[in-house]
Image (spheres, helix red, strand yellow):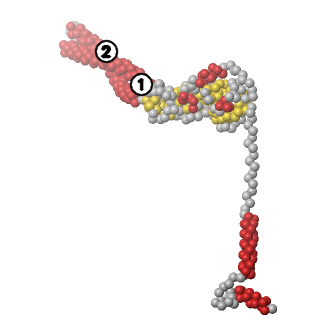
């Protein structure tokens, strides 16, 4: 009984942190050590349980990422067909050059415009030709005014001549009358039938009229000479005016050489020249026209692998990408040019002008078939100038 009481007392002292021993020092007993070990184990278990609970809760709150959607497999390419994108070009484009050297003053068309034969395409200005034409125009105008003045002077001379002739006729009539009177008075005077005064008066009147007639004849001669001179001068000036007019028209023709006109009907596919640049007949073309009636090709550039599957004569379908009223046109592989393939097609209604973007589907399952004329068309197409490759 005493031993039990002593054990309880020691336990109470341990709980209060004091010992029954002198000095009140903390003493660690085996029982106390076991108790603390149990507490530590329990605390560790509690911490482990809490960590597991926290981890489970955070995982439950975490947003669940849905699995990625399955990507549909790309459609399998048709091994018997090749689809390419190309552009329509003309086999025999017309390079338009000016007829004279000079400065490209203005362009009157744009790329893609349809032109007819004789339409004005551009104007080339040549300063030397312009200067000559302007000088000759001034000289022609001066000669024209001179001729007009001579025509008026000649007309006046002819009026004066007509008046002089009329006066001369009148004078001759008066002379004849005065002479007859003078002769009659002379006969009467010789017969003693009239006085000497009357006879002499008739003679003086006749002499006066003869003097007047002589003066009128001089005026008439002068008028006739004036008319002759005026007509000769007028004829000479008219000849000079004709020569000057011909010279001026020639200069105007040189100036008009700067008017560049369309020689064929077709579509403007390229304009290499720019306004303000110097141009010449032997230089680069001002523009390129694809004639309406020319053979056309769709030009495509396949890959090397696709090129190995393409043969001349294989059928093709052309689907324009910029023309709404045409869905599809038939064609065929015509020739090869380097990395390019030429697809010939028929377009009688001119639905696909050069420069039209098209989608070309080539049927590579068909065997190669040689077509008459394709080689000739190819060589004509292959010799196009570099300026027409952009068509």
Camera-nearest residue between 136 and 79: 79
Q: Is residue 312 visible?
A: yes
Q: Quadrant of residue 67?
A: bottom right
Tag 2, which secondary structure? helix
The residue located at (51%, 32%) in the rendering is: 272
Q: Position of residue 180 (x, y in %)?
A: 28, 11
Q: Which mark is residue 251?
A: 1
Are there few (<14), some (14-19), or many (20+) residues within 10 Å of tag 2? some
Residue at mark 1 to residue at mark 2: CA–CA distance = 59 Å
The vertical placement of 236 against 345, above or below, is above
Q: Quadrant of residue 36?
A: bottom right
Q: Position of residue 170 (x, y in %)?
A: 31, 17
Which quadrant, please, contains the C terminus? top right
Camera-nearest residue between 380 and 100: 380
The residue located at (55%, 35%) in the rendering is: 110
Q: Which residue is mark 2?
A: 173
Q: Position of residue 187 (x, y in %)?
A: 24, 8
The residue located at (64%, 90%) in the rendering is: 23
Q: Is residue 260 left or right of residue 203?
A: right
Q: Is residue 257 visible?
A: no
The vertical placement of 20 against 380, above or below, is below
The residue located at (62%, 29%) in the rendering is: 340
In terms of sequence position, does the residue under pointer 1 or pointer 2 come before the other?
A: 2
Q: Is residue 6 left or right of residue 139?
A: right
Furthest residue in direction bottom, as rendered: 2
Q: Is residue 70 left or right of residue 373?
A: right
Tag 1, which secondary structure? helix
């Amino acid at each position: 009984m005493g031993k039990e009481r002593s054990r309880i007392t020691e336990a109470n002292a341990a709980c209060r942190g004091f010992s029954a021993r002198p000095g009140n020092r903390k003493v660690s007993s085996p029982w106390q050590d076991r108790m603390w070990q149990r507490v530590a184990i329990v605390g560790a278990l509690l911490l482990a349980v809490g960590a597991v609970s926290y981890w489970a809760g955070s995982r439950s709150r975490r947003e669940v990422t849905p699995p990625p959607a399955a990507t549909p497999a790309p459609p399998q390419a048709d091994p018997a067909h090749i689809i390419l994108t190309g552009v329509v070009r003309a086999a025999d484009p017309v390079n338009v050059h000016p007829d004279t050297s000079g400065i490209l003053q203005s362009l009157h068309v744009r790329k893609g415009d349809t032109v007819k034969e004789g339409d004005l395409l551009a104007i080339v200005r040549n300063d030397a030709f312009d200067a000559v034409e302007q000088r000759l125009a001034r000289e022609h105008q001066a000669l024209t005014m001179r001729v007009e003045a001579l025509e008026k002077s000649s007309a006046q001379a002819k009026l004066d001549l007509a008046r002089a002739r009329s006066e001369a006729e009148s004078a001759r009539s008066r002379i004849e009358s005065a002479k007859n009177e003078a002769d009659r008075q002379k006969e009467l005077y010789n017969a003693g039938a009239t006085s000497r005064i009357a006879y002499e008066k008739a003679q003086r009147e006749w002499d006066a009229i003869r003097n007047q007639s002589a003066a009128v004849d001089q005026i008439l001669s002068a008028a006739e000479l004036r008319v002759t001179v005026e007509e000769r001068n007028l004829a000479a000036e008219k000849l000079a005016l004709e020569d000057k007019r011909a010279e001026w028209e020639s200069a105007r023709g040189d100036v008009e050489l700067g008017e560049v006109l369309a020689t064929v009907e077709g579509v403007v596919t390229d304009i290499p020249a720019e306004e303000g640049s110097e141009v010449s007949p032997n230089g680069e073309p001002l523009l390129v026209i694809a004639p309406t009636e020319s053979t056309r090709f769709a030009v495509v550039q396949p890959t090397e692998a696709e090129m190995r599957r393409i043969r001349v004569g294989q059928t093709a379908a052309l689907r324009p990408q910029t023309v709404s009223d045409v869905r599809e046109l038939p064609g065929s592989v015509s020739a090869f040019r380097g990395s390019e393939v030429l697809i010939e097609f028929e377009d009688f209604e001119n639905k696909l002008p050069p420069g039209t973007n098209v989608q070309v589907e080539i049927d590579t399952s068909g065997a190669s078939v040689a077509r008459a004329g394709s080689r000739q068309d190819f060589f004509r197409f292959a010799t196009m100038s570099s300026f027409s490759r952009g068509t």
